[in-house]
Amino acid sequence: MDKQIAELNSNCLTAIKAHDKKLDIFTQIDNANISAETLINLLAHYQSMSENDDDEKVDAWIDNLTELERKILQAFEISRGRFENSH
């Protein structure tokens, strides 16, 4: 099962890279050796926090992220916006 998950994660990341090369975040992710699991956890936490009505709590969470994590979230929002606009 772990092999299948790893393969799926790899395929998803490859597809995203092919679609959004100009975001220039993927090289930074590769260089930082960030795993797909870490990315998924970050995005899941972000999604959960974005549904929170407590803006101060969300702002504090975002303030505690690294610069790279904030860039990842920004790239996610850009990709999501492009996807939503194309469908």
Image: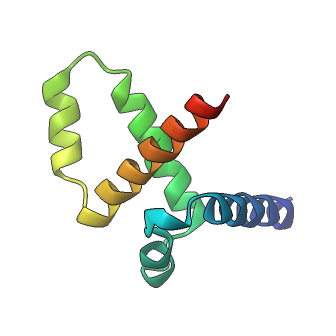
Give residue 21's position: percent from left, percent from top: 55, 67
Q: What color scheme is it?
A: rainbow
Please tell me in which quadrant of the rendered image residue 52 appears. Answer: top left
Q: Where is the N terminus found, in terms of image quarters?
A: bottom right
Q: Is residue 58 left or right of residue 15?
A: left
Give residue 87's position: percent from left, percent from top: 67, 28
Q: Nearer the viewer, residue 86 or 73?
A: 86
Give residue 73's position: percent from left, percent from top: 38, 49
> Taking 22 as reference, is 59 above or below it?
above
Residue that appears at 70% across and 66% down: 14
Residue that appears at 44% across and 50% down: 42
What is the total number of numbered labels drawn onto the structure image? 0
Please tell me in which quadrant of the rendered image residue 58 appears. Answer: top left
Residue that appears at 52% across and 46% down: 79
Q: Nearer the viewer, residue 24 or 44?
A: 24
Please tell me in which quadrant of the rendered image residue 50 appears. Answer: top left
Give residue 15's position: percent from left, percent from top: 71, 60
Q: Nearer the viewer, residue 68 or 64?
A: 68
> Taking 26 as reference, is 30 above or below it?
below
Residue that appears at 86% across and 61% down: 4
> Taking 58 as reference, is 7 above or below it?
below
In the rendered image, the residue lying farthest to the bottom is 31
> Taking 59 as reference, is 4 above or below it?
below
Q: Is residue 53 left or right of residue 14?
A: left
Q: Is residue 76 left or right of residue 61?
A: right
In the rendered image, the residue lying farthest to the top is 53
